[in-house]
Amino acid sequence: MNNIQMGEIADKVLRKRFFVIIPLAVFALIGWQFVRPKSIEPIGNHGAKFDNTAGVYDAGTRPEWCEALQKPNGYLLLSGVIDLPTIDDSHGFLQTDEEELGVFFDFDGGARIGIASKDGLTTRIQSGIEPQIGEMHFVILIRGNGDITYIENDARIEAAASAINPTCNAVQIGMGNESAPFTGELNVYISSGTDIAVAESLVDVYDSQFHSASVQIYNLSKNALIVALILLIIGNPFKKRESKKPATDESVI
């Protein structure tokens, strides 16, 4: 089959493109109306709750949080919601100790996590997720072996920090890593323990809401709408067009 024959077949199909556009548009409408994802469901209450409604909150000393990270199956779990007013400035969200001796969570062009190591240095993990103004749901799971799971809204990354040794002697909510205090709203739950399976189960349940069948159908419906719009706008590219060149009168007078 040559290119001309293929073009003729495509022309015949696309002449009836509205028989394709209408089902695609209906599918997109159903996806938007019935399976559109609801607001993000946070992990919820899994430990102590803090916020910065009254400014930077000094939570004092919480040695049990960091001591859990020295256990074979220990963990530190942080989750919450941040209302990010701008993405142009640096912010400190929280820290567990001064001078990068503990764990910090801040913002510098994007979310960043820092963890003190046994060698006296600090491992910094940049999320690499494109930031957006507004609600930012986050989950940070730090394991005793240094493995880290970070989820920001529906984006998940895995990272690792070797030989971690943070301390939790000066916990502050609403600032961190010597950055300016955060001026937006911050709500966070913090917990620790020695059974990593408990924390991983909470994280997996949270993450599953972004991979359900309804979410996949919704994503397909968005693609269907895009295809329908393209077909509607561009029309039939295989249709033979009449020449727009004006006819010339070759008769001799």
Image (spheres, rainbow, N blue to C red):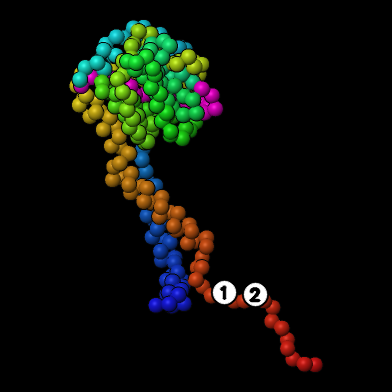
Image coords of residue 174 (percent x, y): 44, 16
Q: Which residues are magenta?
A: 73-90
Is residue 88 one of those drawn in magenta? yes
Frontmost residue, 72 versus 63 = 72
Residue 29 seen in the figure: no
Horizontally, residue 76 falls left or right of residue 219, namely left
- Helix or strand or loop: what does disc 1 sit on? loop
- Label 1 near label 2: C-beta < 8 Å? yes
Disc on res. 241:
1
Q: Residues within 10 Å of mark 2 (few under 14, many from 20)?
A: few
From what the image shows, is residue 122 above or below residue 157? Answer: above
Image coords of residue 85 (percent x, y): 51, 26
* Amino acid type, mark 2: Lys
Frontmost residue, 56 versus 107 = 107
Is residue 241 one of those drawn in magenta? no
Identify the residue at image location x=48%, y=57%: 229
Horizontally, residue 15 falls left or right of residue 190, namely right
Which corner quadrant of the image does residue 76 belong to?
top left
Identify the residue at image location x=41%, y=10%: 98
* Amino acid type, mark 1: Arg
Disc on res. 244:
2
